[in-house]
Image (tube, rainbow, N blue to C red):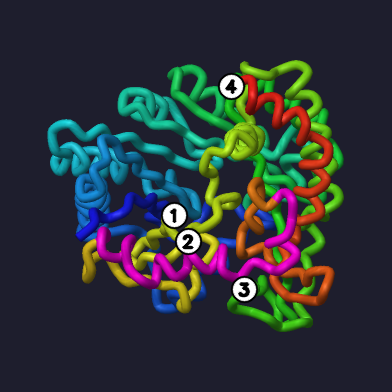
């Protein structure tokens, strides 16, 4: 019998609850999955089952290190005591020889010196959400009173700097900032970390209101792309513009996740991002009550794998349902994708974004196909040269 495969799980201990109200957030609507829930908060039993389960799964897969990833919603709303307890449980269950790391994605608004001291002492890697300079950031990232959040986020960034917490920046690319690639990149580059992530935003509005589900769940032809989604052409131009600056000025000292992943793919290495991997299914999502889903973009009843208080996490992560979900990424590629010269660098992209039809009318073409093709044509020779120079 083969050993279990390793997998990653993104924990959302406060579910979809957040202290701000970003226009483009797809996760706030997940409250509808739990209509009777009054208090979205991971309790002690679920937290312990999560910590124990992640460690048991890592040991079973022969891993020497494991990362706990915390997201939301906004996880800092839970308070510092929750994470102090999580770290204590990690220490209690950690066997000799296993390294444990923690990553926290946050909007930064609640960070203060107590948080800074804790994150630094415990070695947390913090992902801070920043969409650009103040006018750009505040376009869609507002609090529940409609006020911009930029100043509060910058105060949180000052906390991270002051306490020398390791951090990276996560920036969503949408209609308001896609045309400002140079300005955006230079601003982010100067915020004190060499590690940048760009996440393109596309969501569809359902004809009945709210956001439409993933294309495998909601096939209503009346669904339309939201007005804040980035267009394929604009995202492609953004990637090209930022790549040119990065290549000329910052190669080897600024690390843009998208570009780093592409260099690896052009070297023939496996994708480090599930978006560009041939198959997926090894990046699960954990809700506040212990429900485990195949992906945090597929938190729908159809993709629920089970609950970790009822089934060991190692079994859920290696279940037939998880494998089938991951294999479908490869097995449902359109013929256009299968014959594409850039398939190795894209693999059809994220299945959630496969909302278009191919040239021959086949459903399932990725919304960002035009973006990726534009980028590969623009940067391909340089990506190939970079890959060759690494050896």
Q: Earlier in the sequence, mark 3 or mark 1?
A: 3
- Of labels 3 and 1, the one closer to you: 1
Q: Earlier in the sequence, mark 2 or mark 3?
A: 3
Task: Give the distance between the C-alpha atoms of the residues marked 3 and 1, in whole angstroms.
Answer: 19 Å
| 103 to 58, vertically: above or below | above
Determine contact: label 4, label 3, CB under 8 Å: no
Q: Per the image, is 186 magenta? A: no
Number of numbered callouts drawn: 4
Q: Seen in the image, is 40 located left or right of residue 328?
A: left
Confirm or deny contact between disc 2 and disc 3 (CB under 8 A): no
What is the spatial separation of the Cα atoms under label 4 and label 1, in whole angstroms? 28 Å
Contact between marks 2 and 1 (CB within 8 A): the answer is: yes
Mark number displayed over residue 295: 2
Over which residues does the magenta segment extend?
Answer: 313-342
Spatial CA span between label 2 and label 1: 6 Å
Q: Which of 13 and 180 lies nearest the eye of the viewer?
A: 180
Q: According to the image, label 4 marks what residue?
A: 390
Residue at disc 2, secondary structure: loop
């Amino acid at each position: 019998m083969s050993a279990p495969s390793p997998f990653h799980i993104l924990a959302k201990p406060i579910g979809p609850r957040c202290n701000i109200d970003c226009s483009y957030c797809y996760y706030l609507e997940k409250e509808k999955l739990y209509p009777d829930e009054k208090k979205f908060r991971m309790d002690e039993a679920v937290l312990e089952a999560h910590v124990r389960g992640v460690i048991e799964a890592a040991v079973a897969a022969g891993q020497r290190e494991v990362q706990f990833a915390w997201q939301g919603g906004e996880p800092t709303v839970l308070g510092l005591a929750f994470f102090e307890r999580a770290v204590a449980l990690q220490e209690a269950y950690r066997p000799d020889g296993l390294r444990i790391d923690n990553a926290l994605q946050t909007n930064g608004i609640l960070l203060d010196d107590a948080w800074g001291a804790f994150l630094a002492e415990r070695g947390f890697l913090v992902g801070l959400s920043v969409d650009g300079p103040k006018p750009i950031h505040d376009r869609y990232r507002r609090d529940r009173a409609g006020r911009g959040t930029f100043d509060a986020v910058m105060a949180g960034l000052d906390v991270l700097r002051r306490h020398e917490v390791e951090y990276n920046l996560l920036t969503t690319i949408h209609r308001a900032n896609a045309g400002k690639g140079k300005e955006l990149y230079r601003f982010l580059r100067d915020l004190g970390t060499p590690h940048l992530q760009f996440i393109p935003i596309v969501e569809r509005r359902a004809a009945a209101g709210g956001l439409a589900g993933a294309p495998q769940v909601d096939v209503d032809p009346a669904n339309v792309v939201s007005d804040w989604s980035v267009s394929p052409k604009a995202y492609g131009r953004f990637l090209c513009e930022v790549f040119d600056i990065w290549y000329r000025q910052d190669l080897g000292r600024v690390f843009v996740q998208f570009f780093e992943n592409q260099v690896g793919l052009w070297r023939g290495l496996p994708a480090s991002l599930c978006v560009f991997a041939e198959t997926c299914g090894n990046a699960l999502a954990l809700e506040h009550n212990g429900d485990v889903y195949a992906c945090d973009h597929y938190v729908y009843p159809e993709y629920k794998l089970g609950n970790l208080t009822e089934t060991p996490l190692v079994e859920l992560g290696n279940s037939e349902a998880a494998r089938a979900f991951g294999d479908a990424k490869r097995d449902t590629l359109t013929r256009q994708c299968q014959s594409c010269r850039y398939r190795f660098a894209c693999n059809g992209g994220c299945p959630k974004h496969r909302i278009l039809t191919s040239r021959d009318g086949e459903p399932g073409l990725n919304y960002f196909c035009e973006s990726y093709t534009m980028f590969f044509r623009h940067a391909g020779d340089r990506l190939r040269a970079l890959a060759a120079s690494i050896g």
